Image (cartoon, helix red, strand yellow):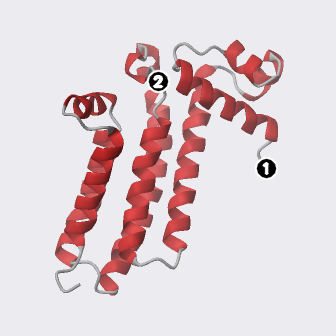
Amino acid sequence: MVSKTRERLIEVARQLFARKGVEHTTMLDIANASDKGRRTLYTYFKNKREIHQAVIEHESEQLVARERQIHASALSATNKLEGIIRARFEAMLTQQPRGMEQLSLRHFLDSNRIGKAKKLAAQKELDILQHVLREGIDTGEFDPKQTARLAPLVILLAHAVDNPIAKENLEILGYSGEIAYDRVISFLVTAVISKDQ
């Protein structure tokens, strides 16, 4: 069982990374904000990269849990699909820490570890998405041909709009992240609906 102290440290780090940026948050900042000493912090995490990894893993687990909850609900496949895509996009709006566009070379060298955590979560998300798509085909809600095209598109779009540069380009065009996400979600869901519906 994960200790409450470790969970508290992860949550405090997440809030600080979002507010100050990863590069501008120190281990001492995390220790002070969590009302724990540096010794306690270093008992759980060797360095800032390790706690950053834990934050990403925690956020990924929460997203997968939310998507599983949507999948297990009594909603129609169409509503499940919209809910899962929306949960993914909302996570992107809330999880991108400030200052991510200014990360150091050391962070990018360490991104392989972070990438593995995200890849594992992405595979779980893809499995859930594929179950919902199959359910939609079985119930006649989704067109099989269009549905086959959707899964890779959702993954591609999720990674593309997760990029800080993409967000800046959307803002240049006059779209907030929320408006752009709503339009993308509507397009994706509408694209797979069976013409017989």
Q: Residue at x 44, y 19 (%)?
A: 99
Question: Is there any visible trace of residue 132 in the rendered image?
Answer: yes
Name the secondary structure under disc 1.
Answer: loop
- Does residue 16 appear to the left or right of 155 in the view shown? right
Q: Nearer the viewer, residue 109 or 81?
A: 81
Q: Residue at x 37, y 64 (%)?
A: 82
Quadrant assignment, res 58? top right
Residue 70 pos. (x, y %): 51, 67
- Does residue 88 appear to the left or right of 6 in the view shown? left
- Identify the residue under disc 2: 98
Which circle marks residue 1 in the picture? 1
Question: Is there any visible trace of residue 51 in the rendered image?
Answer: no
Residue 48 pos. (x, y %): 61, 20
- Furthest residue toward front: 174
N-terminal of the pair, mark 2 or mark 1, is 1
Name the secondary structure under disc 2.
Answer: loop
Residue 60 pos. (x, y %): 53, 46
